[in-house]
Image (cartoon, rainbow, N blue to C red):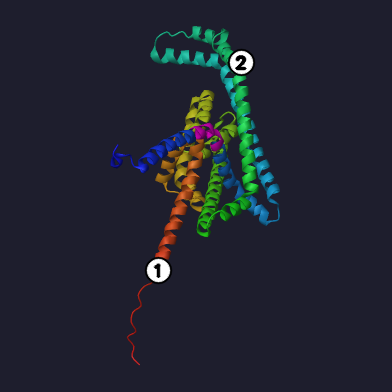
Amino acid sequence: MDASRKMPPWVKRTIIWFWLGGLGAFYAIGVLRALSTLVVLVVISLFLSFAIEPAVNRMETRGIRRGIGTGIVFVVIVALVGVFGAVVGVALATQIIEVVDKAPGYIDDLQTWLNDTVGIDIDLAAVKDEFVGGGGLQDMATSLADDVAAVGSTAVSVFLHVFTVALFTFCLVVEGPKLRRSLAGLLSERRAAVVIDVWALAMNKTGGYIYSRVLLATVSTAVHWGAFTLLGVPSPLALALWMGVVSQFIPGIGALVGAVPAVAFALLHDARTGLWALLVIAAYQMIENYVLAPRITARTMSVHAALAIGAVVAGSALLGVVGAVLSVPVAATAQAFISSWRAERAGAARSDNPPSQEPDQTHA
């Protein structure tokens, strides 16, 4: 064979590296899929550490050790979550049991309303007998009994995930300064400064986000608690607490998810009460969106509305509910970092090109 027609060596190397690269990418994708749950848990832990560390840093400046300060914050968080779960859970269970007990009466009321409105004789006695005698209630009880094992396994899995997130978060908060110093030691001075700046921005924006959400949730709970009490809505504190927390910490549809139980239970109690509850919720959302939220977030976390909406959509597509919750502080951090970077570049450009001096026109 003519030597000039032999395959060049670089072609063989290219083919080998192509297949090796393809196999490596395939293996890396498989590893990422296998570790996807761990990656999500680490991301959640990092977000929580950003939210918690500012409070721990303040306690450290007052002489409280980081480990003790982190433990205090954890105890407060667990207490708040426990109170929320107990109050809302008991109220929802009580209302559901009451609705089931009153279901025959609701069926009779529906029959009367249909007969009076439509003008024809409609008999829903068979529906009521089926629901009470062995249909609806019995099927509901059987379904709940069949799901006990699944609920138990799900609870164990959730507990393990929560424990893992809590452990990672505790370590990240306690060892935060050491971790940043170790990371900076592996990088050049310029890159280390960028990493430290981004980390500080993330902590400030995430802490501001949590602070603003907690403040808005507190105001929302107080207003709805007073309004629901005056209107006679069942379990006013639990429904107001649900409305305040869910509306603030679930981006986009939080207000709708929070309003559904309150309006539904109010409607079952009395139609006019349900209508007034809906009007109160709608009026408060208008006041919050146009008066309260802009003033509070302007001091804690300012992010462009279009950027926030796009971030929520992208976060939901990538990580579901977790991504939607994390998206707003991530977007605020990115916006703040880009703004500071552009300001730095503009300052550097002005220092490199000082304004020209006018020649001195005075003569001796």
Which quadrant of the figure contains the C terminus? bottom left
Which contiguous range is marked in magenta? 30-39
Q: Of residues 92 and 199, which is closer to you in this image?
A: 199
User: Residue 119 location, x and y as percent?
Assistant: 39, 12
Q: Secondary structure at mark 2?
A: helix
Residue carrying label 1: 352
- Say whether residue 269 is left or right of residue 19: right
Which quadrant of the figure contains the N terminus? top left
Q: Of residues 300 and 64, which is closer to you in this image?
A: 64
Q: Is residue 250 at least partly visible in the picture?
A: no
Q: Is residue 334 at least partly visible in the picture?
A: yes
User: Residue 51 location, x and y as percent?
Assistant: 58, 46
Q: Secondary structure at mark 1?
A: helix
Q: Amino acid at mark 1?
A: Asp
Residue carrying label 2: 145
Q: Quadrant of residue 151?
A: top right
Residue 139 colored in magenta in the image: no
Residue 35 colored in magenta in the image: yes
Q: Amino acid at mark 2?
A: Ala
Q: Quadrant of residue 86?
A: top right
Residue furthest to the front? 1
Nearer the observer, disc 2 or disc 1?
1
